Amino acid sequence: MERVQGGAGHAARRAAQLYGAVRAGETDVARLRGRGEPRRVLGLLEFAGQGRREERGAYLRRLAASPDAAAMVRPWLGPAERGHLDVAGGWAPAVPPLLVKLPRGTEDERRYALEALAVKRPMEATGPLFGLLAVLAPDEPSWYPELIEDTVSRIVIGGQLPSWRRTPRTDPVLPGACLPMLLRQACQAVPRVRRLALTLLGCGHDPAHLGLFTAAAGDPDRGVASAALVALGRLDDSTARDHLAAVLTEPSRSLDEREIAAVMLGRAGDRRAFETLVLLLNHRDGIRNASAAEALARLGDPRTARAAATLATNRLRIAYALAAVRLLGRMRAPESLPALTSTLTWLLDEDRTAQQAAAGCVEELGRLGDARAVPVLTRAAGDPRLRAAAVDSLGRIGGPDVLGVLLEVASDEDGDVRAAAARGLARYEDEPRATAALAGLCALPYPRRIVRALVRSGDPAAAPVLAAVRDGAPSAATRRLAGRFRPDPSRTAAP
């Protein structure tokens, strides 16, 4: 890092000339090193080239700390990345000039200004952004209002608008200073503005807004009503749950609104949502299936496993059974193993093409870890479409009956199959045949896919093999990869 900081000068100009050729693949740092380019130029190019493979925010922060590299790379960045980089480096304009660019600027200027505002997070910009959203012309490109909404969300709660379909790991924090502004916007005439304000207000989980959300849930605009229902579902309040339960039986409600109400009730543990969630679990839309399965798993109703098993074994609906299959594996109920085994056996017997359901059965049987699934998984390993997943599941289960299968497929032509076999063989710490097979898999030239599989396994049995890779691999990247191995003491070494 030290050698890329300092005065720009000739090195930065020369690196800027070469950067385009490196990005286009016409040359690389190794070839330039052979041509005798100065170390400072090569350092700048290597830093910029590696940085673009990093996570976007981390890369731009590192870039801002190196003026030479920033000056070189900036012309090649998109407008949003330039805005992020300029804010990180302290080169971005103030808030008023950024707001001036939005109504009449070019697309690049608008994207630059919105990204800079999102990174700066000035609360005084939210009012003008809401006002701009309210007066947008119908012929504006679709990305523009969506980007304005994303910018407002990043300013107010520090991130993108939360999706109601996914349970957030941490709830966003709604600053108290923005509540009056959001309450005003929630009463605006433009549906898009009302929807955005209600969504952000819902992140606050404040029961004081129950009346506002209840009234908005009957809004004639379906988007506004849906946002209000999501906000009601985020309140820990029995009155809000009663309103959501009523939505399930109102004939005027759309399928989207019923889905939101059922999912929110399911997450709250309210069993009034059970019937609706089971119907959604068998819907043709895979996204609805997944949302319903997640809510059913959190609902904790004793009828769930039986319903999921019925759907997973329904031969007429097998194309839509993936969510039910995943739910059975997640629940680990008594019905899970028989249902998954029966469905997979039928698919293998009739050579059906329901690839997603079959692969789901294979993966969930491996997660269950029950030795009774070994025969059907061994059959699945003979199907080229399921071979890698079946070998991986067999390796998870382990046992003496599995070792022979893993040794047989350790020399398979498919690299994914060999990697799955390596993960399974790493469990057989005291078995000489497994150790020999692992050594063969990790012999020169040390395939990186196999090394990565062993590193990710965390099994102590892989330590000797990876130590040999770390000491003898010709590739520095492979040696570094093997050096990342950290044995997991909780892993059961011997199956």
Image: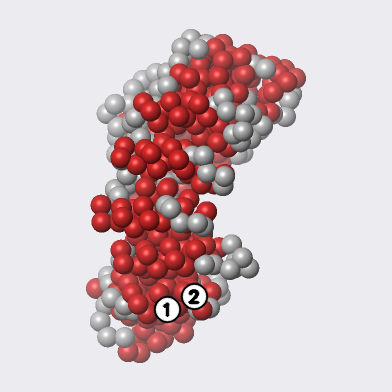
Instruction: Work out which quarter of the rendered image holds the C terminus and state it.
Output: top left
Name which quarter of the figure residue 33 lies in.
bottom left
Rendering coords of residue 349 (x, y %): 72, 17
Residue at the disc numbered 2: 103
Name which quarter of the figure residue 81 lies in.
bottom left
> 10 Å neighbourhood of mark 1: few (<14), some, or many (≥20)?
few
> Callout 1, which amino acid?
Val
Residue with the most extreme bottom position? 10
The reply, left or right, for residue 63 in relation to residue 2 is right
The reply, left or right, for residue 267 in relation to residue 373 is left
Q: Are marks 1 and 2 in contact (CB under 8 Å)?
A: yes
> Callout 2, which amino acid?
Pro
Instruction: Work out which quarter of the rendered image holds the N terminus and state it.
Output: bottom left
Q: Residue at x 31, y 86 (%)?
A: 8
Q: Secondary structure at mark 1?
A: helix
Q: Residue at x 53, y 74 (%)?
A: 107
Residue 70 seen anywhere in this rendered image of the structure: no
Rendering coords of residue 267 (x, y %): 42, 28
Please name whichever residue, 321 or 359, is drawn nearer the observer in this view of the structure: 321
Applied colour scheme: secondary structure
> Does 229 sit above or below residue 130?
above
Which label is found at residue 100? 1
Q: Secondary structure at mark 2?
A: helix
> Does 292 sit above or below residue 32?
above
Q: CA distance from mark 1 to mark 2?
A: 7 Å
Rendering coords of residue 405 (x, y %): 55, 22
Q: Residue at x 61, y 14 (%)?
A: 310
> Does 284 sit above or below residue 452?
above
Q: Residue at x 59, y 62 (%)?
A: 142
Residue 203 seen anywhere in this rendered image of the structure: yes
